[in-house]
Amino acid sequence: MSKRAIIADILKAGEYGKQVLVKGWVRTKRDSKNVVFIALNDGSVIHNLQIVVNPANFDENVLKQASTGACLAVSGTLVQSPAAGQPVELQAETIEVYGTADPETFPLQKKGHTLEFLRDIAHLRPRTNTFGAVFRVRHALAYAVHKFFNDKGFFYIHTPIVTASDAEGAGEMFRVTNLDPINPPLNEEGKVDYTQDFFGRETNLTVSGQLEGELFALALSNIYTFGPTFRAENSNTARHLAEFWMIEPEMAFYELEDNMELAQEFIQYCVKYALDNCKDDLEFLNKMYDKELLGRLNFVVDNNFERVSYTDAVEILKASGQKFEFKVDWGTDLQSEHERYLVEKHFTKPVILFNYPKDIKSFYMKQNDDGKTVRAMDVLFPGIGEIIGGSQREENYDKLLNRINELGMQPETLWWYLESRKFGTAPHAGFGLGFERLVLFVTGMANIRDVIPFPRTPKNAEF
Ligand code: 4AD
Ligand code: MG
């Protein structure tokens, strides 16, 4: 018998009498004189397989080495388990120790560490129940994203990670260069000469794949991107990362209403997918971290999102009688305290705000006839705030060019984007879903650093 069995499959089948070989890491070991119990986990499922060892049959040293954190291969016979909550257990016949974990120094020797402590050992935290659960859910959600769009006939487009443009016009970019930082080549004006840089121009890590995505939507009709994006914004919050993953669908012939409908359907699909496919992990997270998690997820799947214009939302906030830290007035960007009031107190459901003032939104959004607002939409979620940002796009060449100039951006660097409005332009719309914010919502975790394997935040890129 040399083929390894997966613990998830063993527990699911619940068949006994069979010989199996399992491999995994020791979660706990309980010794007594006549029997040793080892809880083995291979990451395939939150549950452990109980290994029952008769110490008389094994070298004392092997059993000593099989301590918490050690990696083992165990073969034996599956037997019906007398213990509650598990169908079968494994009667060990052979044990091979692949790797020991010295109890004196293994950081996960004891249970009950705080999430903050685990962030400092990001290289080992996948070995905990919590992070196992979170990252299995993250995987399921990523799969759901592709399944949703594939089933709808959308094409997955890989937009570039290194770009020469600033898609959001917010100037929050990480530079990409291979020039010598100590002694860069200078031009006649004494400035760094980027024509000598690797790409012959200034380049940066992308903040969004949208602009390139639009070019493909104006050819393949319905596309989406799903890739890493980078923002050098110094936001040290539980909702911001410097490197995060974004899903950006872009649809030709969609208007703002179609966009809102798709956004709701998309999120509900992903949440439902997790509820249907990650039951054990979500129940664990519900029990350990957030007793209302499952209730909240079901609520989002079952209820329509409220659609409210920015202007109406500002009126609601002003009339609320709430004391906000930041004052609300028409034209100001809403802070997360305002968004959360609307979602958690006023409407008590997800909210889609639309038609924002043009001055607080990006250059590419379609201008409304009132001259003041654009066809923007933000989807706001309980406990999260903004989970999606999107808009109908300005498809009129002159209006788009005017806006780029008005904002002091350089049309030369966007000539290719502008040409999409010159040749065969079409109404179109799209949005961006912050993947980690979705994972935060679905897992009920409180900090975005705990739903991405290796978080990049200001002053933090060690692992
Ligand atoms: O609202 P944003 O900036 O929109 C865009 O980037 C558009 N190009 C999207 C589009 O229309 N195609 O970002 C979209 C979403 C936000 O709603 C949020 O969920 C997430 O990306 N996001 C972040 N997530 C984690 N850390 C950050 N620093 C984030 N910035 C934005
Ligand atoms: Mg936004």
Image: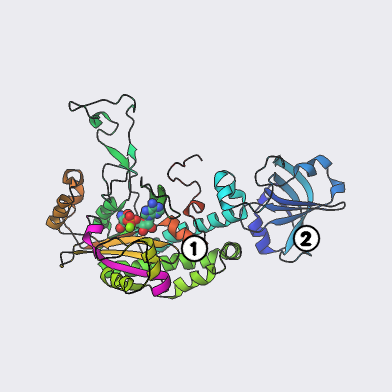
The residue identified by callout 2 is 79
Q: Nearer the viewer, residue 151 or 122?
A: 122
Q: Let me know if residue 359 is in the magenta part.
A: yes
In this orientation, does residue 211 appear? Answer: yes
The residue labelled by disc 1 is 442
Please give the name of the residue rendered at 43% of the width and 62% of the height, measured from the top-left corner. 384
Viewer-side residue, 260 vs 171: 171
* Disc on res. 7: none
Tell me how the rendering is colored. rainbow
> CB at mark 2 closer than 8 A to ligand 1?
no
Answer above or below: position of 98 versus 76: above
Question: How many badges with numbers are in the image?
Answer: 2
The outermost residue toward the left is 398
Q: Is residue 246 visible?
A: no
Residue 377: x percent and y percent? 30, 64
In the depicted view, which residue is nearer to us: 378 or 431? 378
Residue 175 sits in which quadrant? top left
Q: Which residues are magenta?
A: 343-366
Q: Where in the image, quadrant-wise, is ligand 2 located?
A: bottom left
Amino acid type, label 2: Val
Would you say 69 lies left or right of 344 here? right
- Tell me where residue 6 appears, x and y as whole percent: 64, 54
Whether ligand 1 has any atom under 8 Å from the Cβ at mark 1 is answered as: no
Relative to residue 340, is residue 333 drawn left or right? left
Q: Position of residue 332 (x, y in %)?
A: 27, 61
Left or right of residue 25: residue 276: left
Q: CA distance from mark 2 to mark 1?
A: 36 Å
